[in-house]
Image (cartoon, grey):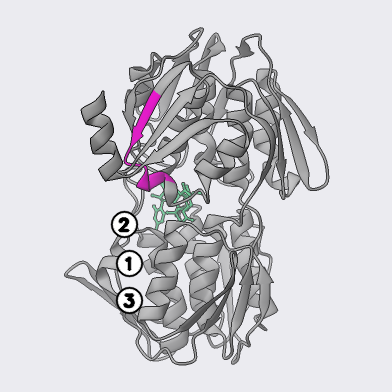
Amino acid sequence: MDKFIINGGKKLQGDVKISGAKNAAVAIIPAAILADGPCVLENVPIINDVSIDLKILSKMGAEVKIINNNTIQIDAKHIKDSVVPYEMARSMRASYYFFGALLSKFNHAKVSMPGGCDLGDRPIDQHLKCFKALGADYVIEHGLVDISAKQLIGTQVYFDKVTVGATINAILASVKADGLTILENAAKEPHVVDLANFLNSMGADIMGAGTDVIKIRGVNKLIGTRYSIIPDQIEAGTYMVAAAATRGNVTVRGIIPKHLEHITSKLRKTGVTVNEFDEFVQVIGKNEPYDRINIQTLPHPGFPTDMQPQFAALLTIAQGTSIITEGIFDNRFKYVDELRRMGADISVDGKVAVIEGVPKLSGAPVKAADLRAGAALVIAGLSTQGKTIIEDIHHIERGYEDIVKKLRLLGADITKKTRYESDSIGKAL
Ligand code: EPZ
């Protein structure tokens, strides 16, 4: 298994450029197959989940061209198949966006039940509820969901739970349906808005994205477009917390400050200085102990659940008792055992973690349980004297473009060891 080796205790200093948003890219790439002509996407993050999406498109017959590092062209006119290769789809959560996109394009989709981070129960009942309301039927067998419709007809759907995935899939499935679709209790995340803006740039008629009522009037034709993906608010937040945890001074560039409101305000509450500008924020840590805070994760515009593990890593070395309540997923505390190996004092009861701050952690061998849990371990390792070895880093590389390069440019001592090199390290230790 590949590993990160971190020799921590160094302040992060300097500038970091944020990449395109993973959770927008994995929705927009499947959506591109709805265009009658080529789509050019800019600011695409080159991460594992995006690579899998592009491989799925190529396998299905789309023409995918890498124009330059972060600009790709997708021409889906030759896609004839509405079945997504099982193993590829199985490996990530966002493959379920092919349900909505293929249903819109072919009135049929056959995709595996999604994989992705193990955060507890992650059903797709709200996705299926919406497809049925639009006139589709489905069968689930052999791990595949086979959905088909004679015709997709506009409808009204009230989501029982605020769900990003189901909101996005509902938009994808209704954008070419016959008539008006109204989604109520819809998710309002920035990547929902980004997808709607992308589809509208192709000729769709979507109103209200970013609010809890989204109206989609079906259109017959969607044309090719050029579109730039929004910056990743979670990647930005991760570097902001890393700057604080290492008591450094980091300028995080290429961001939309409004998307970082909660992260900024929570960091300021711990005593970190955050200076906000039009397209960047400057985060200045301090040498004195940080203040404890409480966090409750909620759907946007509440505090983002994808920033919960990273803040927990910071709060392990704050002064006093912090309480984190996970309001979205059943089990997003898998990183706690690993932080305990580093000396953190955390107790978990269901969806609540109580963190007793300690003066410092110590480097240790740890394992990334999922994407953001891995990010939390990187932050903890960077903030701590001594060597931290992080295994299962494939989770981390799913969502952070060039993380080793970006951190090294900020002064971090972090290296990636491949399986072969790791074996030789093992022998040397
Ligand atoms: C998306 O996951 C993101 N993933 C997650 O980011 C993010 O944590 C999550 O939204 C919440 O913001 C992608 O965009 C690829 P949900 P998703 O549907 O769509 C329940 C990361 O780290 N639910 O909003 O799966 C569900 O169990 C990843 O980048 C149903 O009950 O999240 C959860 O409790 C992790 N039925 C809640 O809703 C459904 O049909 C929110 O899930 C769907 C969801």
Whole-angstrom CA distance, mark 2 to mark 3, is 14 Å
Provide the secondary structure element on which disc 2 rests: loop
Query: Which one is earlier in the sequence, the residue at label 2 or at label 1?
Result: 1
Specify the label residue 84 is tagged with.
3
Provide the secondary structure element on which disc 1 rests: helix
Residue 303 location, quadrant:
top right
Residue 23 at x, y = what percent?
52, 57
Residue sitting nearer the eye, 394 or 22:
394
Whole-angstrom CA distance, mark 2 to mark 1, is 8 Å
Residue sitting nearer the eye, 238 or 135:
238
Look at label 1 and name its amino acid. Ala
Residue at the disc numbered 2 = 115
In the image, residue 29 sits, relative to residue 281, either above or below, namely below
In the image, residue 55 sits, relative to residue 370, either above or below, namely below
Whole-angstrom CA distance, mark 1 to mark 3, is 7 Å
Specify the label residue 89 is tagged with.
1
Provide the secondary structure element on which disc 3 rests: loop
Decide if residue 26 is on the left or right side of residue 257.
left
Residue 154 at x, y = what percent?
53, 81
The reply to whether the C-beta atoms of the residues labelled 1 and 3 are less than 8 Å apart is yes
Local crowd at mark 3 within 10 Å, few (<14), some, or many (≥20)?
Answer: many
Q: Quadrant of the C terminus?
A: top left
